[in-house]
Image: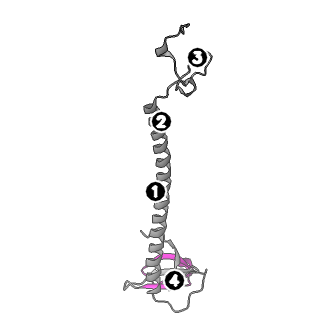
Amino acid sequence: MVENPINPDKVAENPGLMAYAHSVGGAVIKPEDMGRAKGKAVLAMRQQTERQLNQIYQQMATLAQQAKELRQRVDVSERIYSAQMNFEPVLNEVYHVYEKEDGNDVLSMIAPHEWGRSYKYSRYIAKVTMLADHTWHVEYNENQS
C-alpha cells in the first residue's frame, strides 16, 4: 500500500466546507474582523438615527413655535374683542387699535394719519386684520413693545 505523501493531520474530509481556501487555486477568503464590522455598523446606525432625531426635533420646534403664535393670536383676539367697537368688523379689512386715557382699548376704522386734529387717544397700539377664523393678524406699532 502506498502511503499518501500529505500529512493526514492536514487533510480535510470535506474541503469545500472549510472557511478558508484549501488549495493554491482556491478563492482567497480573509476572515472578517467582526468587532470592526460591528463597530462600523453601530456607527452608521447612530449617525442615521441622530439625523432622524434631529429632523424630529426641528419639526417639534416648528410645531411649538406655531402653537405659541396661535396662542398669541388668540390672546390678542380676546383683547380686541373686549375692546370698544361701534361697528361689526368684516373679514380681511384693516382696522386700528387705540388705547384711551382710561386704559381701555378701542377698535377703529380710522388710521392714525387720518385723524388730523381730532385725535383723542393716548396711544396707537396696532394695525389689525380679521382673519377667516375670526382671529386677528396684528402689526404692532413700532413704538409699541
Residue at the far bottom in the pictured view: 86
**Real-space Cα distance between discs 1 and 3?**
56 Å
Mark 4 or mark 1: whose residue is earlier in sequence? 1
- Can you tell which mark lies on residue 40? 2
Q: Amino acid at mark 2?
A: Lys
Please tell me which residue lies in front, 45 or 24. 24
Classify 10 Å Cα crowding around label 4: few (below 14), some (14-19), many (20 and above): few
Mark 1 or mark 3: whose residue is earlier in sequence? 3
Residue bearing mark 4: 117
Please tell me which residue lies in front, 68 or 115. 68
**Real-space Cα distance between discs 3 and 2?**
32 Å
Residue bearing mark 1: 57
Q: Amino acid at mark 3?
A: Ser
Q: Are marks 1 and 2 in contact (CB under 8 Å)?
A: no
Q: Read off the magenta span.
A: 105-130
Callout in the foreground (3, 2)? 3
Q: Amino acid at mark 1?
A: Tyr
On screen, residue 64 above or below 8: below
Colour treatment of the image: one colour
Q: Residue at x 43, y 32 (%)?
A: 35
Classify 10 Å Cα crowding around label 1: few (below 14), some (14-19), many (20 and above): few
Mark 1 or mark 2: whose residue is earlier in sequence? 2
Q: Secondary structure at mark 3?
A: loop
Please tell me which residue lies in front, 127 or 2. 2
User: Would residue 47 be counted in the magenta stretch?
Assistant: no
Residue bearing mark 3: 23
Callout in the foreground (4, 1)? 1
**Real-space Cα distance between discs 4 and 3?**
107 Å
Q: Residue at x 63, y 16 (%)?
A: 25
- Can you tell which mark lies on residue 124? none
Mark 3 or mark 2: whose residue is earlier in sequence? 3
